[in-house]
């Protein structure tokens, strides 16, 4: 089976019952939110935005909110043991808990998705303060991950009730990160299609691309993936599952160390990937490297690009093309000691695909890292 393009896929019958305006924020449960916030500010160029904790009346946890352009991360740590947040961190290590989605009506979003079989995580809840109100609701998705629906049309505060503005004299310069392009989930053996059906039936998404183990494989390992998108294309969730191979795939390694299904990586858009990745390198972010031989024939495959190839080669940035243009992408090494969560930096020059032409080189680079850890 080769790549399936959107026109070949039968869409869900009603794509408009859950209109999404994009990703509101990504929330990470972490062992030390204060240190994590400092790391993401220093290394990635986020700015301080908001804080919640005992000083704001939240007694069981602390959360630091950081922002860069339209990209918002929330970093949350429990203050005590024996609670769901502490249990999540013990089981998974630092990882993504919440993929929060912007909606105009969080109550309707919850009604529509639970009516279609979504498992309730948070019934519609109104949070109020002097700046107005935010309505939150949520459902479960794969593993311990959840989707929150965030309605903030009647709120003028810094983030949401329960948070106060977090002012800091330490605000490193932006690295040019813009917004969440897509978030990739790793699920267990034979679980990709059930979760594809979940996104189709419960959230009205459609399958816009499919890759099988012939598309995404090396001599040693393989995986399968389907890309789910909402109706307007603002929210995209590729879903990976392992496939049979001679050795352990990157998805299997993730599942082993994360102790279950979860978000494998967050892809972040930039308008100038050379400048962004150069700055991230300077700040200590390590990226996967492909062999230099990749660049000897890449332009034969993708054709003309606007960028000079030399800095792309030096930085290890990958290039791919589809019918609508080309893209530039690079993948970080894991952000934690567990080989789980990592980030992708992506610049789209018209392309709407996900770099199929880079899969083999990327997976061989991942396998070299797995082998160094003794996990291949």
Image (cartoon, rainbow, N blue to C red):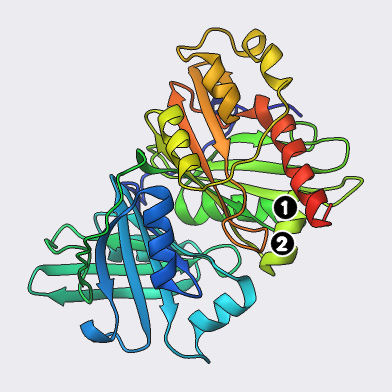
Q: Can residue 115 be seen in the rendering of this structure? A: no
How far is the residue under mark 1 from the one under mark 2? Answer: 6 Å
Are discs 1 and 2 less than 8 Å apart at CB? yes
- 236 vs 174, nearest the viewer: 174
> Which quarter shows the N terminus?
top right
Question: What residue do we see at 50% from left, 88% from top?
Answer: 83
**Residue situated furthest front in the rendering:** 282
Residue 338 is tagged as none
- The residue labelled by disc 1 is 251
- 9 vs 347, nearest the viewer: 347
- The residue labelled by disc 2 is 255
Question: What residue do we see at 66% from left, 35% from top?
Answer: 289
Q: Secondary structure at mark 1?
A: helix
User: Is 125 situated above or below 165?
Assistant: below
Q: Residues within 10 Å of mark 2 (few under 14, many from 20)?
A: many
User: Is 83 situated above or below 347?
Assistant: below
Q: Which of the 4 image quadrants contains residue 27?
A: bottom left
What percent of the width, then of the height, locates residue 154?
Answer: 13, 61
């Amino acid at each position: 089976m080769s790549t399936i393009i959107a026109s070949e896929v039968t869409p869900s019958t009603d794509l408009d019952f859950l209109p999404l305006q994009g990703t509101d924020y990504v929330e990470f449960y972490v062992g030390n939110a204060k240190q994590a916030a400092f790391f993401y500010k220093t290394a990635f160029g986020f700015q301080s935005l908001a804080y919640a904790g005992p000083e704001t009346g939240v007694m069981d946890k602390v959360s630091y909110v950081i922002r860069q352009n339209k990209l918002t991360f929330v970093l949350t740590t429990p203050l005590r043991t024996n609670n769901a947040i502490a249990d999540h961190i013990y089981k998974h290590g630092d990882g993504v808990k919440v993929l929060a989605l912007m909606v105009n009506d969080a109550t309707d979003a919850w009604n529509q998705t639970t009516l279609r079989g979504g498992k309730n995580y948070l019934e519609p809840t109104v949070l109020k303060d002097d700046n107005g109100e935010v309505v939150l609701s949520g459902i479960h998705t794969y593993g311990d991950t959840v989707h929150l629906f965030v309605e903030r049309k009647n709120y003028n505060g810094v983030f949401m009730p329960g948070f106060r503005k977090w002012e800091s004299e330490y605000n490193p310069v932006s690295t040019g990160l813009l917004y969440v392009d897509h978030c990739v989930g790793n699920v267990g053996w034979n679980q990709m299609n059930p979760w594809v059906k979940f996104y189709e039936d419960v959230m009205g998404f459609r399958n816009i691309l499919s890759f099988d183990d012939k598309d995404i494989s090396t001599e040693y390992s393989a995986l399968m993936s389907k890309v789910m998108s909402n109706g307007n294309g603002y929210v995209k969730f590729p879903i990976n599952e392992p496939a049979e191979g001679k050795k352990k795939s990157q998805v299997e390694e993730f599942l082993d160390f994360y102790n279950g299904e979860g978000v494998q990586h967050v892809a972040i858009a930039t308008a100038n990937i050379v400048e962004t990745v150069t700055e991230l390198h300077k700040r200590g972010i390590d990226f996967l490297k492909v062999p230099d031989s990749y660049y000897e024939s890449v332009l034969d495959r993708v054709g003309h690009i606007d960028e000079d190839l030399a800095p792309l080669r030096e930085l290890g940035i990958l290039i791919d093309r589809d019918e609508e243009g080309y893209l530039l992408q690079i993948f970080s090494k894991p952000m934690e000691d567990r080989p789980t969560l990592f980030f992708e930096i992506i610049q789209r020059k018209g392309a709407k695909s996900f770099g199929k032409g880079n899969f083999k080189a990327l997976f061989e680079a991942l396998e070299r890292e797995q082998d160094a850890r003794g996990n291949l």
